[in-house]
Image (cartoon, rainbow, N blue to C red):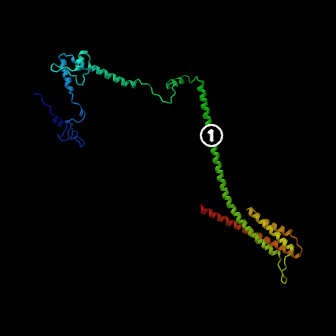
Amino acid sequence: MAKSFDSATYLRGLGWNGPGSSLNNSASGRSKPVTVAQKKTLSGVGRDRDTSFAWWDAVFTSVATKVGGDKTDQQHRTSTGILSHRPPPPQGNAYEPLTDEQKAARSTGLNLDAMAAVKLEMARRQLYSGFLRGSTLTGSNDDPKSPPASSASAGASVGKENDPSGRKKRKRDEQQERSEEKLAKVERKEAKRKRKEEKEARKAAKRDRKGKGKEVDSALSSSAAESTASSALVSVDVSTTGTPTEGEAEAPPSKEERRAQKKLRKSLAALAAVESASSAASPAPVVASIVATAASTPVTSASSVGADEAAYLEAKAVARRAEKEERRLAKLAKKALKEKSKTQA
């Protein structure tokens, strides 16, 4: 008697601990058997199949009749020789009368299945002929006289080296590219020139703003010069009248003295106007004009000569004081402008 093989005993000999434990003796092993899902319902593929015709019974019947040497199943085959799954045509028997179609088929000897297959094949060929043998569709804007793209490219590749028109076209393209590069270069130069002009305009505006500040300084200095000139004029007027001595009555100025005073006033007014126009004018012309005016005035008596000398000295002192005052006012004006610019920034 042959000895039976026990798989459990064999596995225990290899180190298996028995049911409920894995084969590799670790926690990651599988302790439960693999469950196989068995299909016991009609859900899934073939659920909506048509069971009105039992084609398997028809196949079994056709094969069973073939065993006895019956050749009648040839008419139920398709053109490929495979048994059809379609229901076979009704066959007459001795108990049922023949239909009109069966009588026509027997009288003419036509095979209805073969005719149906031919019709189906003709319909299929007619359907696919439009896809395989149809004409190529072209756009409405395409030129019908132009050759196909393939032939045109082939002709261009063949005669590309020996075609003079091709060389001319390439030359024109190169010239056009060079002209475009030159035009772009000119445009860049023009843009650079415009940027330079804008920069110069900004610098000029900045200089104008600075010039306005200098004009303010010159206006302040000119106002100081005018004030000093007016004070000098008053002092000259006072001094030219002559200082009366004790016991002498104040005599009114003569006609020549009044004329000299008038000329002195005019010269001082002109000097003040010149100083207001130019900010860098020095107060030295004040002294020179006073000296010239004093020298040009005619003196008729010795008392008037002494008065003119005193007026000259007084005017010189006033001019010095005016120069100092002008410098002081200019410094104050610059300091005020600096503080104002700092506060605005």
> Is residue 104 in sight in this rendering?
yes
Occupied quadrant, residue 303 = bottom right
Residue at the extreme left:
1
Question: Which element is circle 1 on?
Answer: helix
Vertical side of 105 occupied by 204: above or below: below
The percent position of residue 205, horizontal first and vertical second, equals 66, 55
**Which residue position holds label 1?**
185
Q: Residue at x 20, y 24 (%)?
A: 58
Image quadrant occupied by the N terminus: top left
Spot occupied by residue 336 in the image (x, y as percentages of width and height): 65, 65
Question: How far from the left and from the top, in percent, is residue 182?
Answer: 63, 37
In the image, residue 252 sits, relative to residue 178, either above or below, namely below
Q: Quadrant of residue 240?
A: bottom right
Q: Is residue 283 visible?
A: no
Q: Residue furthest bottom?
A: 247
> Is 185 situated left or right of 41 in this image?
right
Mark 1 is on which residue type? Lys
